Image (cartoon, rainbow, N blue to C red):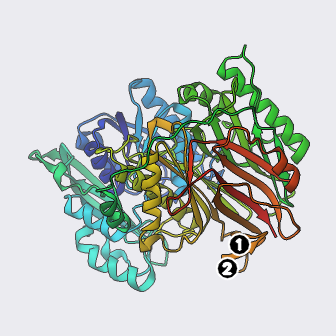
Amino acid sequence: MKFVALVSGGKDSCFNVMHCLVQGHELVGVANLRPPAAAADELDSFMYQTVGSSAVDHYGEAFGVPLWRETITGTAVNQALDYAAADADETEDLYRLLAAVKADRPDVEAVAVGAILSTYQRTRVENVCGRLGLVALAYLWQRADQGALLDEMIAAGVDARLIKTAGVGLTRAHLGQTIGQMRPLLGRLHDRYGLHVCGEGGEYETLVLDAPVFARRLVIDRTEAVVHSADDVAYLHVDAHAEDKPPAAGWEASVAVPPLIDRQLADAHAALAGFEPTAPPTAAPVPAKTPVTTVGRSADTVRIVNVTAPAPDRTVADETAAVFGRLRALLVAEAGTDDLFAISSVTLLLASMADFAAVNAVYRTYFAAAPNPPSRVCISTELAAGCRVQLSVCARLPAAAGPRTGLHVQGRSYWAPANIGPYSQAISAGECTYLAGQIPLVPASLTLPAPDDYATQTVLSLQNLARVASVVAGPADGSAGPEFTGALYYLVAYVASPAYRQAACRLWQSRPEALAHWTCDMIAVEVRQLPVSAGAEWVAVGVNEKHAEEPTAVERTAVRGLAATAYGQTWFAVLAADAVPALGGDAGGIVGVTVFCTEPHFDGAALASETGAAVEVVYVRSVAKADGTPTRFGFVVHGYL
């Protein structure tokens, strides 16, 4: 893609440009927001580095491309993590800048941004990109090992100098030092005080004078040290010019690209690499009738399932709109709200994945009004004759305690796939975190991996899910840390063939130590087709441990004769069997039951009557226990204590 790079003069934006070029994108310009002419270099902006702004005048020459600049006129009016446009906000200055770029270069498709851990910065850039039809390229996003990342910058030849110090242990004396000279001290300050080695906490800022990607380098003519406050916060005003330099041939080899499969899952991937499937093909059930729509509720949650609107004279787009019309009416009747953002998660079933684009175009219109749309799993499976779309949702009741928060990363990175639909990677509400289905897309390119084999697809899709779960469960700064984190209530592997069903079960049985804390149950479910013809899609509901004021244990317990995973008042149980279990009784209420069914005459009505719960019916080609044993039914039971 042709891209323009947002540059501050700092190391992160420069190094991200290098990664964009390594990934095959074409740099056509750089863009910068500067302080007003009469203002000081340092604006203390929530969004932008302004120190070194005078030197950025020469960044078009440095990169050998046009430079677009606009002036910062706004302030941080909207300080929420999830940004919505606000008059006089400094983010609207970014919109104005990129709109000017688009006006001059309509062929620009993407914007490079050097965000590493700042959700505040990421959501604002993604908001602006979404409004202008641009893709965010953020290849440093979630590089939580900042020491390794800084070492990569140094090894790649990025000549960055400190031009502002604002962290413990850093003083005016360190201004002008290179990141290579500062690396030992930064490491010690990290070990002693927790300082962010890359300066993600605002501890320091840099100016890049030269890099292999530069066509011309910057030479400093004059500097002036300015003490910004009494606590060793100081910066350099820099005057510089650009001069010719020898070209740096072959620099791309010096840019370290993270491996596709993390070290935590590398052994599991290697063990699965020689997998040869033995399972025979399976037949598709032909559902006898469309499952009845049912509703279940607890004190804070309502589940509405099997919402359909079949009609032979409708287009699939019209059918999708009719389904949403029914859903909204049911939300009003059962939850007292027509706000679709009360929904935490959606299961979208299609009779044919060929209808995905048409359905998705209608779907996105219902979730464009605000940040963090519901998480989603989308599969193609067997639906009753005449039915092309089936929708089931879990929503929070308006009176429910606690916030609804989300993770909706839309930029490309090495971390996990950006969304290919209008849904969040995760929504946290109450005691649950609803994780969207993750398929084996390579995050950097959003393509299926090459080689395209059982091992890589099965492991990569699980790794994508684990990375999302890790960020949601991780520390407040958004970093995942070196290991996967986050407990799960349950896990489902949707697969596109019996061979992938076997691979998923084998991976789960031999999962590595990094996932040892996932003590929940798992089942594998074979469906007709997955998005982009993927082989596997992992889906889970995680424990929202940030919900409770006091630490609460995740427990394995028995509820209604089921082995359940419980946290607080919420429990989930997963089982695979050849018959429908008896779920009646008084111990532990049931909100919903998802039934993965190979039996075409099962419609869930009797089970809904027995339990008083929402019974979602998903007709599938095969079901297997975690050990790989095939069964006729799979069940996910959602209850409350």
SS at circle 2? loop
In percent of width and height, residue 197 lies at 37, 71
Res 148 seen here: yes
> Which amino acid, mark 1?
Tyr
214 w.r.t. 625: above or below = above
**Residue in view at x 39 percent, y 49 percent:** 457
Task: Judge from the rendering whether residue 525 lies leftward or rightward of residue 610; answer left or right.
Answer: left
For this rendering, which residue is in front, 267 or 181? 267
Q: Can residue 115 be seen at all in this image of the molecule? A: no
Q: Vertically, is 605 above or below 202? A: above
Depth check, front residue: 269 or 61: 269
All told, the count of numbered labels is: 2
Quadrant of the rendered structure where residue 469 is?
bottom right
Q: CA distance from mark 2 to mark 1?
A: 6 Å
Where is residue 78? Give x, y as percent: 66, 51
Question: Which of the pair 1/78 is nearer the observer?
Answer: 1
Q: Quadrant of the N terminus?
A: top left
Kindly state the secondary structure of the residue where label 1 is placed. strand
Residue 567 — which label? 1
Residue contact between numbered discs 2 and 1, judged by CB atoms under 8 Å: yes
> Which callout, 2 or 1, points at the residue further toward the start of the chain?
2
Q: Which residue is mark 2?
A: 553
The amino acid type found where label 2 is placed reads Ala
Give x and y (percent) for residue 88: 64, 43
